[in-house]
């Protein structure tokens, strides 16, 4: 596998529970898009099978809402080499995937409010886009 890097970027102004949920949703989608990032199941000392986990570190970075919008636009320009996953605020007001899909389809790009993004691709490109962002603490 080439030098791959993944990062999750969230708005630190969101409530803690929303931040945790945003990171979980973005991580699940990355895992679906890149199953090769998940290691094989492992055996523990007693010989019991344990589920494989990610083979790469995935830092959780922070940036504000407007910076998320700018980062999304910049990452979109590299769609041929990057996986970009977005999560918008409609997830907090919809109760089903179908409602979320309808809200997404009805909201113009400039009105979208991003809670978080996930990026995965060549390490150099991901670092270029996220290198100035701090870790969420």
Image (tube, grey):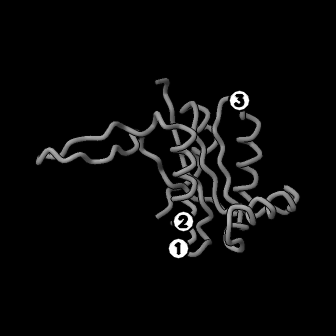
**Mark with earlier residue (3, 1):** 1
Q: Are marks 3 and 1 in contact (CB under 8 Å)?
A: no
> Where residue 44 sits in the image (x, y, percent)?
17, 46
Q: Residue at x 30, y 40 (%)?
A: 41
For residue 91, which numbered disc appears in the image?
none
Q: Residue at x 71, y 41 (%)?
A: 75
> Where residue 32 sits in the image (x, y, percent)?
54, 43
Q: CA distance from mark 3 to mark 1?
A: 33 Å
Q: Are marks 1 and 2 in contact (CB under 8 Å)?
A: yes
> Where residue 123 sits in the image (x, y, percent)?
54, 33
* Mark 1 element type: helix
Apparent side of residue 91 relative to residue 61 in the rendered image (left or right):
right
Q: CA distance from mark 1 to mark 2?
A: 6 Å
Nearest the camera: 14 or 29? 29
For residue 21, which numbered disc appears in the image?
2
The crowding category of the residue bearing disc 2, from other C-alpha atoms within 10 Å (few below 14, some 14 to 19, many at least 20), is few
For label 1, the residue is 17
Q: Are marks 3 and 2 in contact (CB under 8 Å)?
A: no
For residue 80, which numbered disc appears in the image?
3
**Mark with earlier residue (3, 2):** 2
Q: CA distance from mark 3 to mark 2?
A: 28 Å
* Mark 2 element type: helix
The crowding category of the residue bearing disc 3, from other C-alpha atoms within 10 Å (few below 14, some 14 to 19, many at least 20), is few
| Vertical side of 118 occupied by 93: above or below | below
> Where residue 67 sits in the image (x, y, percent)?
71, 56
| Vertical side of 111 occupied by 26: above or below | above
Q: Residue at x 42, y 44 (%)?
A: 57
Nearest the camera: 53 or 60? 53
Apparent side of residue 94 relative to residue 15 in the rendered image (left or right):
right
* Mark 3 element type: loop
Q: Quadrant of residue 13?
A: bottom right
């Amino acid at each position: 596998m080439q030098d791959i890097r993944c990062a999750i970027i969230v708005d630190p102004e969101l409530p803690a529970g929303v931040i945790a949920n945003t990171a979980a949703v973005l991580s699940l989608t990355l895992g679906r898009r890149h199953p090769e990032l998940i290691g094989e199941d492992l055996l523990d000392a007693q010989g019991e099978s344990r589920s494989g986990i990610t083979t790469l570190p995935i830092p959780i970075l922070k940036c504000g809402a407007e910076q998320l919008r700018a980062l999304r636009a910049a990452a979109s320009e590299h769609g041929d080499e990057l996986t970009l996953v977005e999560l918008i605020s409609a997830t907090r007001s919809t109760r089903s995937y179908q409602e979320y899909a309808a809200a997404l389809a009805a909201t113009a790009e400039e009105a979208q409010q991003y809670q978080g993004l996930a990026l995965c691709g060549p390490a150099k490109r991901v670092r270029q886009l996220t290198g100035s962002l701090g870790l969420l603490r």
